Image (cartoon, rainbow, N blue to C red):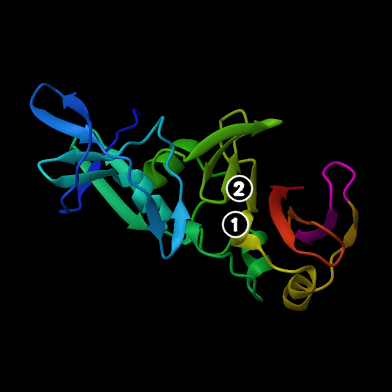
Amino acid sequence: MKKFVLGLICGIGLTATTAVYAVDTIQAYLFPAKFEFNGVTKEMNNKEYVVLNHNGHAYVPIRFVAENMGALVKYEDTTKTISIEQTNLSKKLPLDKDFFSYASEGKIKGIEFGIGSNKNDIIQKWGEPQKTGSWQTQYFSWFDYYYFFGNPDESVSAIRVGGDTVKYTVDELKKVIGEPKDEGLNDVESGWYLYYEAGDYQVFFNADTKNGVIKYLTLKKR
């Protein structure tokens, strides 16, 4: 799916210097605006996103704004529809007594797609991924959720969750879900690992130190 730079009218008077012409029908100007979300300044990638001034109104990239406010943006080409939806993907992962119940089904509580989910179904529901890359296996990421598609049918083979979404201390983790089956120094990636099992699934937590803060968790089938 092509990426679209979509605008939201802010309705404020602006001035600028550089003219831009879109489809030979309107004249607009690049505007070097800064963004703050709940008091936190966010830098915009000027190579991908721009802010425009047209007739005294600011047009901002809707995907950049929506995602920084914790929402998913999708564009349906056939109906020319832009949809914005709130999502649990942008919220802190809930660690509670139900954690292993969901993990035993290859899922993370509050997130509808788990291990074995179809790649196209996820994209249809969540829209184009915010980032793609590879950690030995190709992944697509939405907020702090990284979905790996290592199976021949491109279904989900593993899920990694990192960032502020899973920022608990090791002590907080153990108090909520109990002592791990195994733990120790991580020989592959720096830090301290904690290993749990839930049915046919494995759950790895990686912290910066033995008593430090969780950096990410990984859920995969045994």
Q: Residue at x 7, y 26 (%)?
A: 25
Q: Given the image, on which type of amino acid does mark 1 rest?
A: Lys
Q: Are marks 2 and 1 in contact (CB under 8 Å)?
A: yes
Q: Which residue is mark 1?
A: 107
Position of 118 compared to 194: left or right?
left
Position of 157 compared to 37: left or right?
right
Position of 219 compared to 189: left or right?
left
Q: Residue at x 66, y 63 (%)?
A: 167
Q: Count neighbours of disc 2 (C-alpha within 10 A) and say few if under 14, some if 14 to 19, many if 20 or more.
A: many
As drawn, 79 above or below 205: above
Span shown in magenta: 186-198
Q: Is residue 38 something one can see in this rendering?
A: yes
Q: Given the image, on which type of amino acid does mark 2 rest?
A: Ile
Out of 216 and 113, give the one closest to the viewer.
216
Name the element at disc 2: loop
User: Which is nearer the N-term, disc 2 or disc 1?
Assistant: 1
Q: Which residue is mark 2?
A: 115
